[in-house]
Image (tube, helix red, strand yellow):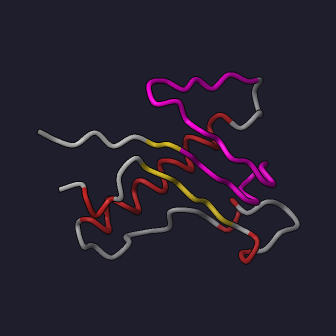
């Protein structure tokens, strides 16, 4: 039986339109509602990039491409001001 891994929190700093945001996910369901351009897709793409990176680390693969681009950094900020942190219900080392 595969373990259930859930996202508990996402922190974005200077990622696209977000200067600083922390999103806490409900254990069962989290819904994103907002106008066009509010950042719903940005949140999902940040999660997807983090999970792709974790997947490649588990498979002991070297990263095949860029998970995030320079254009993802908020305008007027630099790479040193950029951060994405994804908190999971279990460390990925315990997924086996």
Asked where in the image residue 6 lies, by quadrant, the reply is top left
Where is residue 21? Give x, y as percent. Answer: 74, 48
77 to the left or right of 6? right
Confirm whether the magenta stretch covers residue 66.
Answer: no
Residue farthest toward the right in the current orientation of the protein? 76
Image quadrant occupied by the N terminus: top left
* Left/right of residue 20 with respect to residue 66 in the rendered view: right
The answer to which image quadrant residue 68 occupies is bottom right
In the displayed orientation, state which residue is furthest to the left: 1
Counting from the top left corner in percent of width and height, residue 33 is at 68, 22
Q: Which image quarter holds the C terminus?
A: bottom left
Q: Residue at x 39, y 56 (%)?
A: 52
| Magenta stretch encompasses residue 30 | yes
In the rendered structure, which segment of residues is drawn in magenta? Answer: 9-34
Residue 51 vertical position relative to residue 68 in the rendered view, above or below: above
> Considering only vertical position in the picture, is 78 above or below 28?
below
Residue at 64% from the left image edge and 53% from the top image edge? 11
Residue depicted at x 55% and y 35%: 25
Q: Position of residue 39 (x, y in %)?
A: 71, 38
Expressed as whole percent of the image width and height from the top left, the position of residue 8 reads 50, 43
Q: Is residue 9 left or right of residue 71?
A: left
Q: How many marks?
A: 0
């Amino acid at each position: 039986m595969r373990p259930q891994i859930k996202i508990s929190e996402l922190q974005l700093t200077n990622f696209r339109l977000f200067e600083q945001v922390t999103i806490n996910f409900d254990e069962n369901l989290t819904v994103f509602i907002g106008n066009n351009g509010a950042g719903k897709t940005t949140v999902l793409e940040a999660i997807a990039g983090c999970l792709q990176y974790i997947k490649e680390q588990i498979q002991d693969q070297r990263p095949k491409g860029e998970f995030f681009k320079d254009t993802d950094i908020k305008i007027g900020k630099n790479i040193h001001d950029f951060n994405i942190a994804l908190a999971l219900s279990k460390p990925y080392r315990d997924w086996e």
